[in-house]
Image (tube, coloured by chain):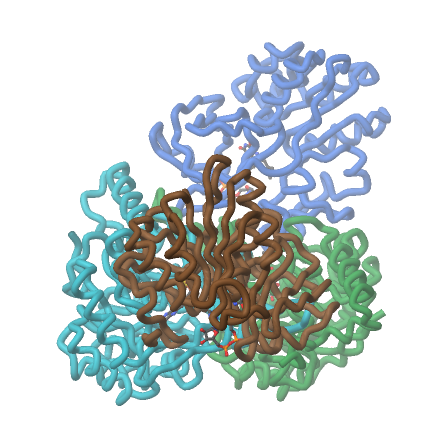
Chain colours: A blue, B brown, C cyan, D green
Amino acid sequence: MLPLNATIVKINEESPSVRTFFFDYQFETMKPGQFVMVWVRGVDEIPMGLSSKNSITVQRVGEATSKLFELKEGDSFGLRGPFGVGFSLPSKEEKTLIVAGGVGSAPLAPYAEAASAAGSEMHTVLGARSEGDLIFEERFAEAGNVYISTDDGSKGTKGFVTDVLSRLDLSAYDRIAVCGPEIMMASVFRLLEDRKVLAKSEFSLHRYFKCGIGVCGACCIDRSGLRVCRDGPVFSGVQLLDSELGRYTRDASGRRVKI
Amino acid sequence: MLPLNATIVKINEESPSVRTFFFDYQFETMKPGQFVMVWVRGVDEIPMGLSSKNSITVQRVGEATSKLFELKEGDSFGLRGPFGVGFSLPSKEEKTLIVAGGVGSAPLAPYAEAASAAGSEMHTVLGARSEGDLIFEERFAEAGNVYISTDDGSKGTKGFVTDVLSRLDLSAYDRIAVCGPEIMMASVFRLLEDRKVLAKSEFSLHRYFKCGIGVCGACCIDRSGLRVCRDGPVFSGVQLLDSELGRYTRDASGRRVKI
Amino acid sequence: MYTLTGLKLENPTILAAGVLGTTGASLCRVARQGRAGAVVTKSIGPAPKTGHPNPSMIKLDCGFLNAMGLPNPSYPGFLQELETAKKDSDVPVIASIFGGSPAEFKEVAEGLLPGKPDAFELNVSCPHAEGYGAAIGSNPCLVEAVTAAVKDVVNVPVWVKLTPNVSDITCIGNAAESGGADAVVAINTVKGMAIDIESGYPVLGNRSGGLSGKAVKPVAVKCVYDLYTALEIPVIGVGGISSWQDAVEMMMAGAAAVQIGSAVYDRLDIFSEISAGIETFLQRKGYSDVKELIGLSHEMV
Amino acid sequence: MYTLTGLKLENPTILAAGVLGTTGASLCRVARQGRAGAVVTKSIGPAPKTGHPNPSMIKLDCGFLNAMGLPNPSYPGFLQELETAKKDSDVPVIASIFGGSPAEFKEVAEGLLPGKPDAFELNVSCPHAEGYGAAIGSNPCLVEAVTAAVKDVVNVPVWVKLTPNVSDITCIGNAAESGGADAVVAINTVKGMAIDIESGYPVLGNRSGGLSGKAVKPVAVKCVYDLYTALEIPVIGVGGISSWQDAVEMMMAGAAAVQIGSAVYDRLDIFSEISAGIETFLQRKGYSDVKELIGLSHEMV
Ligand SMILES: Cc1cc2nc3c(=O)[nH]c(=O)nc-3n(C[C@H](O)[C@H](O)[C@H](O)COP(=O)(O)OP(=O)(O)OC[C@H]3O[C@@H](n4cnc5c(N)ncnc54)[C@H](O)[C@@H]3O)c2cc1C
Ligand SMILES: Cc1cc2nc3c(=O)[nH]c(=O)nc-3n(C[C@H](O)[C@H](O)[C@H](O)COP(=O)(O)OP(=O)(O)OC[C@H]3O[C@@H](n4cnc5c(N)ncnc54)[C@H](O)[C@@H]3O)c2cc1C
Ligand SMILES: Cc1cc2nc3c(=O)[nH]c(=O)nc-3n(C[C@H](O)[C@H](O)[C@H](O)COP(=O)(O)O)c2cc1C
Ligand SMILES: Cc1cc2nc3c(=O)[nH]c(=O)nc-3n(C[C@H](O)[C@H](O)[C@H](O)COP(=O)(O)O)c2cc1C
Ligand code: FES
Ligand code: FES
């Protein structure tokens, strides 16, 4: 499938370095946690979680994301997707905990909405460096309780999401959905492993994508060989046992890079 | 579509030079008048009308048909189809006349059966050189009245099908379906034109086929440029007005050959 | 109205050689009913040829395979068809010709001149006819010689149709240009074959043939793209075009016009459908002229 | 059990180079879960390469286009992946390598020898990496030299992977054979490109790339058919195989085994599915050995 042409209809500034781009196409079948390949023409094509049926929420980090930040309403980019396996939705009786760090909120906000629409009781642990970097606080708040942590203490608990998590009774939740920087996810993983609740957890991973469709092998993780773009990006905690998570990732050449 | 593999399950001797080959595949959607491309492997692929959902009825004339005559039950050939436009079926109230010469009976026998099943009153004028060459007399007789003509007078009227036709009240019929040697069809065409009943007639043409699927242009007729393999082989009499019918055909190189 | 090597076309869609081009009446039908902007005849040679045994064309999941084997009634036999096409089609009629040598090409071109074709297209690219087609079209010297030989004896435009079955199509395109070609046409079919696994027989009567249709579009787009960069003369794009989107893509790659072959399988009025689609696209995008599309992708960097 | 250039394979399906071959773990997964008879690594070169910018692979209506640009961590970086694959996959692991000269090929082969690959596959056929791949693989002298250079320093089988983007693939195949190749692999991708008509941009980051998948199967079958006639050494067939029927067809054309690349898109266990399908076909047809299929179409005349 060739990239479809998506025209930007609205841009929201979520934080100094994060913007949401709404476009004129609705991915009706998208499942929260699924991603699209965003083609910034003439520059690069990069994976982005869908933050709603018709938006991506982008943190400016390098060339392609900076180029995206230069775009205005009416400009367009290419989109292929939705791809990958998303978070599994809770049923009505289930209680769900979301752990979102930084721009990790992007795929988790629509998950919170879908879970709450499904009738699940929702709690969110939302972390960021600083108050101004908290993404989608209102969306999570509308779906349920929100516990906040900031590195600098400008809002909520001073510290990391794990500091909040360690105080929660994790046995009370049926599902735990995690997305954020890998260092954070690795700490959460260890904490959930210690608490023996890995089996009900899901993590959305980031790896370098080339094809995005499960053929090239660029995004495979050790030791399972699972493809983040196709078998993931969302994996159950159990799938990640004995994995490279938090230890190394790979660059575009396939070389291991320490995290 | 690659040729499907058809295995011969039964062979019927219809006349000294005509055999029906039943195969183990049913063309469920076939419309009488449609044809298949019969691939005699290692030799040639030739068009044959379907004489039923699972049979072709072949006159031995040259290399490929002779090779077919060497095949036994259990042997196989390739089949592509059904292709082309068949005869249009009458409705219950309509009276139908069939004019079949020689192996032209092949596509007309299933037509007679389908028309009679539709409730149409059926008459058939069946011609051949000699009694032994009459093809499918019983199938036509089961569907309705049969008038027979043979060149040598061994059965029915001595003469041509036109000799029978000229004595019929053609205004009594709603549809007239014709298939047979081109010389015969040309005479019938002139007769129907004279009687001003061309508009309700249909003729099944033979031309040299290469592709059989309407792309190469080998089978196009003058002056309409219609493709016998795709726009035909069945044409209404009106489509054939001012055509090459009965005057010339073309060989495999595209050269005109007088009839 | 649209000019291509001096020919006036109502629209940039042209019937490709060897497709519905056996008779004058068929060419007229494609022009009048199908509304092609121009039509190319089937390839005509020095002597009558019946072509390869059937099966000569099959539909695949992706595209078509064919090995017609250049059946044709020779130029004397084809002259009356050409005349019919010229008389009744109301669009430019391009005579596709082939031969085994520059002298044969010249003979055929001269032989068809009385039929007044609006241009000649030299088939140096058919992949399944020994001694003809790609046998010549893989050799730059022969391509130049053949082109020059025909240019020498005709005073209508000469297009040279190229094969993709070479290491570097631009080198053959350059040879055609040096020989005086007014345009190149790319691509003829890609060498291919299919085998019937039930019997083990290759399906085509000629055992192997050429791939056309959807499967080859990316190959054709690439060839056109490269030729557009390498040549001064127009490139006519052909290969797998079956929608207006395909035609626009080919023009953006560099095609000055497009030819359509296999897609007549879908419907005869593919030409009017595609030219209407292009028009709507131009309007939506605010282009004033279809020529603005030609080679556009080369500017997008 | 089945022998190919001395390697023992459980079944004749092999993972093609550059597909799910970046890490040792991924190769193991294809071998163990997918049940491939052997696996080929992604092509490894002398220095780390990040490859072309994205988009680097897109799915088309018919097949796929890719221009990865030979991303690889270089042979020192890949050694531990090769070791993992060898240790855990339980099937032969073939190291695909590339370089810009015979000396570089030799360097990479020697560099990977400590990883004990069961064979080497020389990539002289990638169509979209300047100075590498097809740049070498279109030149018979270079192909012979590269093959001989690697044969010189290794004592495992050497396969040479050929490009279809040449006028005559058998001439390149002959060169590989002369250089001492134990088998040839045909085909790598066919040059192609696609353009996004909304923006005019070529879709691939590298602008153009290589076509694979269903679209190229007839091209691959033809190449394998011709190579089977021309060479003494085994031909390994690759290109568009996505069903057991395709695999049987390729073997009847002359393939001693098949490689599967793009079709892992459909499902990972395509290897076991295809080998099971071949088995059932052999039984139905009464063949005693899969080897009876190899080149069968050449006998059907
Ligand atoms: C499944 C998935 C979902 C993602 N969702 C989001 C999201 O919703 N919001 C968001 O802001 N970011 C998201 N990312 C991360 C995002 O893809 C990178 O931030 C982006 O690619 C950076 O591109 P760049 O050109 O600006 O940076 P560059 O300067 O090119 O690189 C900076 C870093 O970005 C990452 N990166 C670059 N190219 C790729 C690539 N092709 N694939 C993966 N990572 C790459 C690498 O870690 C690289 O080191 C997601 C990544 C994945 C894998
Ligand atoms: C639509 C259609 C339906 C037909 N249905 C029947 C049928 O039901 N029963 C039947 O016996 N015959 C039928 N024919 C005629 C049949 O196709 C020819 O008799 C057959 O092709 C002869 O092949 P051959 O190799 O034995 O003869 P050859 O020696 O090759 O040629 C003898 C003559 O057969 C005809 N012929 C040969 N090849 C072709 C071809 N590819 N396409 C068309 N004609 C060809 C030519 O007129 C040729 O002069 C039909 C033809 C057409 C076009
Ligand atoms: C049935 C058939 C016959 C063809 N005959 C010729 C021919 O005589 N001369 C020629 O130059 N090209 C011939 N071609 C090639 C087409 O003109 C065209 O280059 C090719 O099919 C690719 O275009 P398409 O994908 O639109 O069919 C033929 C193609 C087909 C399918
Ligand atoms: C994403 C991708 C990457 C590839 N990388 C390589 C490579 O590194 N080396 C190589 O020799 N071939 C490479 N190829 C070519 C394949 O090995 C194979 O020859 C080709 O894709 C045709 O087979 P298929 O149709 O089964 O995919 C690659 C193909 C794809 C699709
Ligand atoms: S990015 Fe290619 S397999 Fe995941
Ligand atoms: S036989 Fe090719 S168009 Fe009819």
| D267 vs A16: above or below | below
| A257 vs D70: above or below | above
Residue occupying image coordinates x 63% and y 19%: A114
Residue C183, quarter of the rendered image:
bottom left
Residue occupying image coordinates x 30% and y 58%: C258
Front residue (pair B198, A203): B198
Q: Position of residue D78 (x, y in %)?
A: 69, 61
Residue D185, quarter of the rendered image:
bottom right
Figure quadrant, ligand 1: top right
Residue C218 seen by the camera: no
Q: Position of residue B243 (x, y in %)?
A: 29, 61
Residue occupying image coordinates x 50% and y 76%: C53
Front residue (pair A241, A87): A87
Left or right of residue B9: residue C224: left
Q: Position of residue D204 (x, y in %)?
A: 46, 52
Residue C237 seen by the camera: yes
Left or right of residue A147: residue C117: left
